[in-house]
């Protein structure tokens, strides 16, 4: 799944959770101001949380330092091992590109439709007569235009008196700045144009706006007379899409005018665990840190089982050349059980260490194809070469990589330089030979023509 699809899926899941909480706990509480804040802010919060990913670094206790083979068989009984999958790049299928294009077209179409509605409304405002009042401007339209508001503009008919509950209703919309809520949700709707939940969310916000205004107006007027006026307004012309309609959601508004407000209570404290759950489920990204692993458990614990057999029977059917020149063949640590030079405890060494000055040329032991040439945690800069169907060699702790993955090399060609990258106490070459993905003793396969120091 692409990053775009993951983002949209996570944002959708969080908005579904928010909708469930709103419908079950907040919708009929009577706390309209709090509900307005939640309806406006939650889509923004969900979108933001879906965009961010907070890495949680976990220390890895058991790691297989074999970076090349994926799905290798576990060693025989007596070994503890966890296989680290190969980091080989996987070609992405072509469909995510079409998905991104489809999403972008929908976003542009939704945004363009909103912009055209907004431009049409602004054009109408510029052509109609206006009269300024403190805090708002009355725009005189035709007689078929219902009373409505947009931003600081109140759409009114010239013959209507500038007073009464209808006028007060629209003025409250303006003072409460409800248009800002609508514009913010329109932006979220363009971003999530494919999600039908956002259209429901916008409708719920408009309902809450009307609840807020109805409560404000009925504080000074008779609820009964105001309800009669609402009924009389029903069936009028449909207002512009961006305007705040006066007569929509009539039944719900009449019910809410007589609905007692739930006392200030615990309900809104549920937002705390809701946010915490979204943070844990959708923003935290667990990552292992090979650089900070427990070096006491770094290697397969063959030393814990003295009678355990070696990884493979060591046949001598292949002869390889030493990976450094003869004058640098100085073995400082052999294959198998040893005392770790850093932890001073028993561990199992999967290769041999050859001490050499920094920058000493590292040579390919045989002809083959470079599988990896990269930095890999405790191994530092490494090169992995595949020689045939079963044999690989690996050169670690390098200071410089001179070949690239996919490149074919001949025996004796310089592929890198000795270094001390990764977990190392000084310049040396850690050299491994693997048969069928499992380490074997390199000394049984290296040429005996050169004399070690």
Image: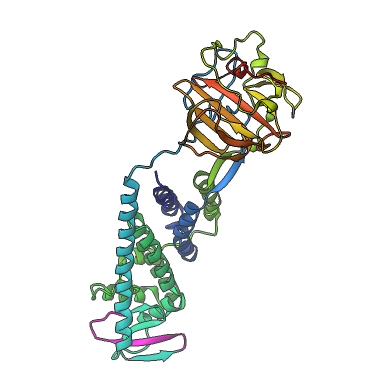
Judge whether 392 appears above or below 278 on screen.
above
- How many numbered marks are there? 0
* Magenta stretch in the rendered image: 134-147
Does the stretch in magenta take in 38?
A: no
Q: Is residue 367 left or right of residue 226?
A: right
Judge whether 89 appears above or below 434 on screen.
below
x, y percent for residue 204:
37, 61
**Nearest the camera: 389 or 43?**
389
Residue at 29% across / 73% down in the picture?
A: 116
**Nearest the camera: 438 or 133?**
438
Q: Quadrant of residue 290?
A: top right
x, y percent for residue 358:
70, 37
Judge whether 332 appears above or below 112 on screen.
above
- Please name the colour scheme applied to the rendered image: rainbow
Residue at 48% across / 37% down in the picture?
A: 405
**Nearest the camera: 270 or 267?**
270
Residue at 55% across / 56% down in the picture?
A: 265
Instruction: Give the quadrant of the N terminus.
Output: top left
**Nearest the camera: 130 or 109?**
109
Residue at 30% across / 91% down in the picture?
A: 158
x, y percent for residue 300:
62, 21
x, y percent for residue 288:
58, 37
Q: Is residue 119 visible?
A: yes
Q: Is residue 13 left or right of residue 127?
A: right
Q: Is residue 381 visible?
A: no
């Amino acid at each position: 799944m692409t990053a775009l699809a993951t983002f949209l899926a996570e944002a959708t899941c969080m908005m579904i959770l928010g909708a469930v909480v709103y419908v079950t706990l907040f919708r009929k509480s009577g706390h309209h101001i709090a509900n307005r804040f939640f309806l406006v802010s939650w889509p923004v919060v969900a979108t933001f949380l879906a965009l961010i990913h907070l890495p949680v670094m976990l220390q890895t206790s058991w790691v297989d330092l074999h970076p090349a083979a994926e799905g290798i068989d576990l060693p025989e009984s007596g070994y503890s091992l966890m296989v680290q999958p190969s980091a080989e790049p996987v070609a992405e299928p072509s469909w995510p590109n079409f998905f991104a294009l489809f999403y972008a077209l929908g976003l542009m179409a939704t945004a363009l439709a909103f912009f055209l509605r907004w431009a049409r409304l602004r054009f109408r405002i510029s052509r109609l007569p206006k009269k300024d009042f403190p805090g708002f401007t009355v725009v005189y339209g035709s007689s078929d235009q219902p009373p409505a508001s947009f931003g600081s503009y109140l759409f009114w008919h010239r013959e209507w008196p500038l007073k009464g509950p209808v006028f007060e209703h629209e003025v409250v919309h303006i003072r409460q700045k409800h248009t800002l809520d609508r514009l913010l949700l329109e932006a979220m709707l363009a971003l999530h144009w494919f999600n039908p939940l956002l259209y429901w969310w916008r409708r719920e916000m408009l309902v809450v706006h009307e609840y807020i205004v109805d409560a404000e107006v009925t504080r000074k007027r008779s609820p009964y007379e105001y309800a009669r006026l609402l009924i009389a307004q029903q069936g009028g012309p449909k207002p512009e899409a961006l305007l705040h309609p006066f007569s929509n959601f009539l039944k719900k508004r009449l019910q809410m005018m007589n609905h007692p407000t739930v006392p200030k209570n615990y309900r809104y404290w549920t937002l705390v665990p809701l946010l915490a759950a979204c943070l844990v489920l959708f923003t935290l990204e667990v990552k292992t840190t090979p650089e900070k692993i427990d070096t006491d458990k770094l290697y397969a614990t063959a030393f814990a089982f003295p009678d355990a057999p070696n990884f493979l029977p060591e046949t001598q059917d292949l002869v390889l050349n030493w990976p450094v020149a003869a004058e640098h063949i100085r073995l400082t640590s052999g294959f198998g059980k040893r005392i770790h030079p850093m932890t001073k405890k028993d561990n199992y060494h999967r290769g041999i260490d050859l001490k050499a000055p920094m920058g000493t040329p590292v040579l390919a032991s045989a002809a083959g194809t470079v599988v990896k040439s990269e930095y890999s945690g405790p191994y530092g800069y490494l090169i992995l070469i595949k020689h045939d169907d079963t044999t690989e060699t690996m050169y670690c702790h390098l200071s410089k990589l001179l070949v690239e993955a996919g490149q074919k090399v001949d025996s004796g060609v310089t592929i890198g330089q000795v270094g001390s990258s990764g977990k190392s106490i000084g310049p040396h070459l850690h050299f491994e030979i693997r048969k069928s993905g499992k380490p074997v003793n390199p000394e049984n396969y290296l040429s005996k023509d050169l004399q070690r120091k």
